[in-house]
Image (cartoon, grey):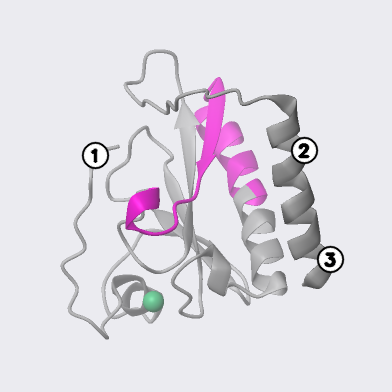
Amino acid sequence: MPMFVDTTPPGQCLFCRLIAGEIPSARVYEDELTLAFMDIGQCNPGHVLVAVKRHAANLLELTEEEAGAVMRTARRVALAVRDTFDPPGLTLLQANGREGDQTVFHFHMHVVPRHADDGIALTWPRKEPPFAVLQDYAQRLHGALAGA
Ligand SMILES: [Zn+2]
């Protein structure tokens, strides 16, 4: 993924300023909790970002309501992208933390129209552990969810 470098000083979040209208953006859609606007990088025509209006650095800082609102808006935008640009594929991408390839530390989800051989690469190594390891992971997560 080509890296966008956010040079915004601490305490002056780039997307908070964009949402407040202090810096320009090509707005697509907004509701009470989310704002969708064109990504300046435009991997393909119709590449949109869906951000939460309240400052939340990442997925872990969203409320349940915001998390639902983001997916609702992403779906609405995806339908508009289909109707407008008619890409044969579409990828949702949402990154958390530097190690997760997040570059702007205000929650956002990419809605990316996709085409054959469009130069976008999403790859990861398959490690395929034994089934007992999968069961152990599942049990630990199930325990964490039960305690939540
Ligand atoms: Zn922010």
Residue for point 26% across, 83% down: 12
Q: Is residue 123 magenta?
A: no
The amino acid type, in three-letter code, at marker 3 is Ala
Judged by depth in the image, the label closer to the viewer, 3 or 1, is 3
SS type, badge 2: helix
Does residue 19 sit above or below 99 in this rendering?
Answer: below
Q: CA distance from mark 3 to mark 1?
A: 38 Å
Residue bearing the label numbered 3 = 146
What residue occupies the far bottom of the structure in this picture?
11
The verdict on label 2 being within 8 Å of ligand 1 is no
Residue 28, percent across and down? 49, 57
Residue bearing the label numbered 2 = 135
Picture quarter with ligand 1:
bottom left
- Highlighted magenta segment, given as a residue range: 75-100
User: Horizontally, is 29 left or right of 79 in the view?
Assistant: left
Residue 72, percent across and down? 69, 56
Residue for point 75% across, 31% down: 132
Precedes in sequence: disc 1 or disc 2: 1
Tell me, for residue 2, which label it has, or none: 1
Which quadrant of the rendered structure holds the N terminus?
A: top left
